[in-house]
C-alpha cells in the first residue's frame, strides 16, 4: 500500500512538471506560425511617451535620441522624461537632448510605479490629454518602428499593447549572450506563441502602451518591484487583455556587473514569488466562481516557474523518482511524467531559439547554463532568508560608479565588466579633468615592478581594467570579485561607439605607414557622423616628441576621446606628462589597436582568447 501511495505522489508531482514544460513546448511550436498582423496605416494617434528616470544622466540622452528618430510624425508624439527623485543632472541632460522634463521630488514614494502613476494622472488632467501613453525605460534604445507598431495596434482596437523587449548586446560576454537568449525565449517565443494561439501577452515594464480610455477606467495601480507583472494580473482580473506587437521593438542593457546582476535577480525572482503567492489563489478562485476559462489560463501561465527553476526542479524530480524506482520503493510508471517533463525542456529551448531566429552565439551561450543555475540556487537561498517586496531599488546601469578597486602587483585594477568600463568612459565626455585609462596586462605588471615611474603613472590612472587573463587570475587569488577581463581590443571600439552616440569626436595618435588614416576612415564608415582626426608623429624618443605641435592638433580637432598608440609604456608616459594640458575628456593607451581597426593585424581565434592565449597569437604575429 505504501509503495502505491508513494508512486501516486511521485506521479502527481511529475504531472505538474510535465504540464508546465509541455505548455512551453506548445508555445515554441506555435511561435513558428506566428505572423504579426500588419495594422499600420496613416498614423493618427497622439502619443505621450513617458521615460521614468532616476539618476539616468549617463544614458537618458541616448534613449531620447532614439525616440526623436522614430518613424512616426513628430507632431503626434510628445517625449516626457520623469526626473524622479534624482541626485544627478538627469533633467538637464534630457532637456539638452530634446525631451520635455517633469521633475518629481517625493522621497516617501520612490519607485517606477509611483512615478508612472504621478505622470499619468497629470497627463489625464490636462485640457487636451493624449490618446495613449507609452512607457519606455530611460536606459533603453527604441528601434525606429516602436511607436508606429504600438500606435498601429492601438488603432486596431487594442487598449493595452506590449512591444518586443530584447537585450542590447554590447559587451559580447557569455552572461549577456545567455540573457539575450533568455529574452528571446520569453519575449519573442512565449509571447509570439501565445499570440498565435489567440492568447494575451504580459506587460514587461518597457515598451508598453495604454490608451486613454483604459487609463481612465483602470489607472496604474502597481507599486512593487515587479510592477509590470502586478499590473498585468490586475488588468486580467478586470477583463483587459495585453496585445503583443511583435513589429514594435525596444532594447535595454543588462545589469552592470555581478553585484548588480545578483540584486536584480533578487528583485525579479523575489517579486515574482510574492505576486504568485498573493495573486494565484485569487486568479484560480475568481476563474472558478465566474466561471472564466481565460482567467484559468492566466493562472496556469503565472504558475509556470522561471525556466531555470523549472529545469532544476525537473532534474531533481527525475533523479529522485528514478532512484526510488530503482530501489523498488515506487513503480516505473510513476517516473514517466518526470522523464517526459525533462525531455520537453531542451526541446522547448532548441525549437524556441529556432523559431526566434536566434544566432549562433545564442546557442553557444547555452553552455554557460550550469553557472547560471548555480547563481539561481544562490538567489533562491538568499530569498529564503530575506526579501522585502515593497522595497524599491534602482538597478545599476553600465557606467555607474562604486566599482571595487583592487591592487595587483602594486597596480590598481577596477573590478568592472566591459559595459561598466565603457559607461565610465562615456560619462567622462564633456567633463574635466582628463580621465586616463589603462588596459593592464602582464607586461604592464612587469614594467611597473621594475620601473617606479611607470608604477606611479598606473597608480594615477582614473580607470584601470584587467586586459589579460594573468591579471584576472592574480586578482582571484587575492580574493577579489574580479572574474572577467576587459580586452583593450574590445574596449576601444566600444568606447568609440559611445563617443559616436554622445556626438563626441575622436583623435588617433600614433601608428606607422598610414595605419592611423586607415583606422580613422574605417571608424567613420562604421559610425556615420563621427568626427575622427588623426596624426602619425615621426618615430622619435619620448623626449624628442613635438608635444606642443601634437597638443595644438588635438585642440583644433575638438575631440573628447584620445587614443594613443605609441606602445607601452611610451604611450602611458606621454599621456601622463601632458595630462594637465590635454584638451580631451578621456585618453587611452591603445597599443596595437589602431593596427587591428585598420586590418593590418587580426585578432586571435576565439578559442585562444577564451583560453588566455591571445598574447601568444600576438607574439607570433
Image (cartoon, rainbow, N blue to C red):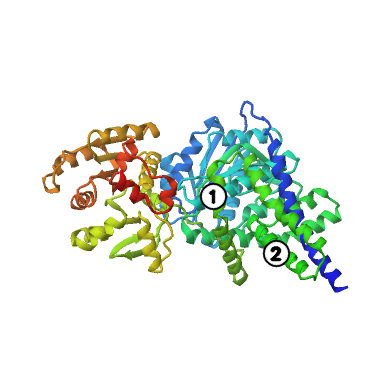
Is residue 69 found left or right of 508 in the rendered image? right
Q: Secondary structure at mark 2?
A: helix
Residue 203 vertical position relative to residue 269 in the rendered view, above or below: above
Residue 614 vertical position relative to residue 357 in the rendered view, above or below: below
Q: Position of residue 442 (x, y in %)?
A: 30, 57
Q: Position of residue 573 (x, y in %)?
A: 20, 52
Q: Nearer the viewer, residue 603 or 518?
A: 603
Indicate which disc, 1 or 2, sits on the residue closer to the N terminus: 2
Q: Position of residue 410 (x, y in %)?
A: 28, 65
Query: Closer to us: mark 1 or mark 2?
Result: 2
Classify mark 1: residues with Cα within 10 Å, few (<14), some (14-19) or many (20+): some
Q: Which residue is mark 1?
A: 365
In which quadrant will I find the C terminus?
top left
**Residue at the spot 28% in from the left edge and 52% down from the top edge:** 436
**Residue at the spot 68% in from the left edge and 48% down from the top edge:** 347
Is residue 249 found left or right of 462 in the rendered image? right
Is residue 73 found left or right of 238 in the rendered image? left
Which quarter of the picture shows residue 387? Answer: bottom right
Separation of marks 1 and 2 at Cα, in angstroms: 25 Å
- Do we see residue 276 in this rendering? yes
Q: Nearer the viewer, residue 120 or 348?
A: 348
- Do we see residue 125 in this rendering? no
Q: Which residue is mark 2?
A: 319
Amino acid at each position: 500500500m505504501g509503495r502505491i501511495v508513494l508512486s501516486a505522489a511521485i506521479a502527481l508531482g511529475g504531472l505538474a512538471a510535465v504540464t508546465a514544460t509541455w505548455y512551453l513546448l506548445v508555445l515554441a511550436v506555435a511561435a513558428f506560425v506566428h505572423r504579426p498582423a500588419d495594422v499600420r496605416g496613416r498614423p493618427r494617434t497622439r502619443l505621450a511617451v513617458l521615460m521614468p528616470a532616476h539618476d539616468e544622466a549617463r544614458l537618458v540622452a541616448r534613449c531620447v535620441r532614439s525616440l526623436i528618430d522614430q518613424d512616426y510624425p513628430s507632431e503626434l508624439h510628445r517625449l516626457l522624461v520623469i526626473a524622479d527623485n534624482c541626485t544627478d543632472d538627469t533633467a538637464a541632460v534630457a532637456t539638452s537632448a530634446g525631451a520635455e522634463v517633469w521633475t518629481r521630488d517625493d522621497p516617501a514614494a520612490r519607485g517606477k510605479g509611483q512615478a508612472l502613476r504621478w505622470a499619468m494622472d497629470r497627463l489625464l488632467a490636462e485640457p487636451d490629454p493624449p490618446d495613449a501613453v507609452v512607457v519606455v525605460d530611460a536606459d533603453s534604445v527604441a528601434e525606429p518602428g516602436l511607436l508606429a507598431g504600438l500606435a498601429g495596434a492601438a488603432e486596431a482596437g487594442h487598449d493595452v499593447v506590449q512591444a518586443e523587449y530584447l537585450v542590447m548586446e554590447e559587451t559580447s560576454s557569455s552572461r549577456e549572450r545567455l540573457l539575450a537568449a533568455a529574452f528571446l525565449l520569453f519575449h519573442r517565443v512565449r509571447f509570439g506563441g501565445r499570440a498565435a494561439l489567440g492568447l494575451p501577452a504580459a506587460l514587461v515594464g518597457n515598451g508598453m502602451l495604454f490608451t486613454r480610455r483604459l487609463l481612465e477606467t483602470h489607472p496604474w495601480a502597481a507599486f512593487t518591484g515587479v510592477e509590470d507583472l502586478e499590473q498585468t494580473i490586475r488588468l486580467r482580473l478586470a477583463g483587459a487583455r495585453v496585445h503583443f506587437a511583435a513589429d514594435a521593438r525596444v532594447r535595454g542593457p543588462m545589469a552592470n556587473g555581478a553585484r548588480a546582476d545578483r540584486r536584480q535577480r533578487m528583485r525579479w525572482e523575489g517579486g515574482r514569488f510574492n505576486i504568485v503567492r498573493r495573486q494565484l489563489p485569487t486568479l484560480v478562485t475568481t476563474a472558478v466562481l465566474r466561471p472564466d476559462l481565460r482567467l484559468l489560463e492566466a493562472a496556469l501561465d503565472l504558475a509556470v516557474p522561471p525556466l531555470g527553476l523549472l529545469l532544476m526542479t525537473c532534474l531533481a524530480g527525475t533523479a529522485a523518482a528514478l532512484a526510488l524506482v530503482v530501489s523498488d520503493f515506487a513503480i516505473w510508471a510513476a517516473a514517466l511524467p518526470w522523464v517526459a517533463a525533462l525531455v520537453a525542456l531542451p526541446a522547448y529551448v532548441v525549437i524556441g531559439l529556432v523559431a526566434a531566429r536566434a544566432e549562433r552565439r545564442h546557442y553557444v551561450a547555452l553552455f554557460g547554463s550550469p553557472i547560471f543555475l548555480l547563481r539561481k540556487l544562490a538567489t533562491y537561498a538568499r530569498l529564503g532568508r530575506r526579501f522585502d517586496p515593497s522595497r524599491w531599488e534602482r538597478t545599476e546601469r553600465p557606467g555607474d560608479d562604486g566599482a571595487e578597486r583592487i591592487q595587483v602587483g602594486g597596480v590598481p585594477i577596477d573590478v568592472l565588466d566591459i559595459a561598466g568600463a565603457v559607461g565610465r568612459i562615456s560619462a567622462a565626455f564633456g567633463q574635466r579633468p582628463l580621465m586616463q585609462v589603462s588596459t593592464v596586462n602582464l607586461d604592464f605588471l612587469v614594467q611597473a615592478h621594475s620601473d617606479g615611474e611607470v608604477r606611479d603613472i598606473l597608480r594615477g590612472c582614473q580607470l584601470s581594467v584587467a586586459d589579460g587573463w594573468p591579471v584576472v587570475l592574480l586578482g582571484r587569488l587575492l580574493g577579489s570579485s574580479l572574474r572577467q577581463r576587459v580586452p583593450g581590443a574590445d574596449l576601444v571600439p566600444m568606447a568609440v561607439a559611445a563617443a559616436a552616440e554622445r556626438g563626441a569626436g575622436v583623435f588617433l595618435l600614433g601608428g606607422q605607414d598610414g595605419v592611423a588614416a586607415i583606422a580613422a576612415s574605417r571608424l567613420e564608415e562604421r559610425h556615420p557622423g563621427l568626427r575622427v582626426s588623426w596624426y602619425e608623429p615621426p618615430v622619435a624618443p619620448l623626449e624628442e616628441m613635438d608635444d606642443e605641435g601634437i597638443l595644438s592638433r588635438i585642440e583644433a580637432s575638438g575631440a573628447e576621446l584620445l587614443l594613443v598608440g605609441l606602445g607601452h609604456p611610451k604611450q602611458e608616459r606621454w599621456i601622463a606628462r601632458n595630462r594637465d594640458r590635454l584638451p580631451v575628456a578621456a585618453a587611452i593607451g591603445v597599443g596595437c589597436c589602431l593596427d587591428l581597426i585598420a586590418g593590418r593585424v587580426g585578432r586571435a581565434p576565439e578559442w585562444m582568447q577564451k583560453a588566455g592565449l591571445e598574447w601568444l597569437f600576438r607574439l607570433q604575429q
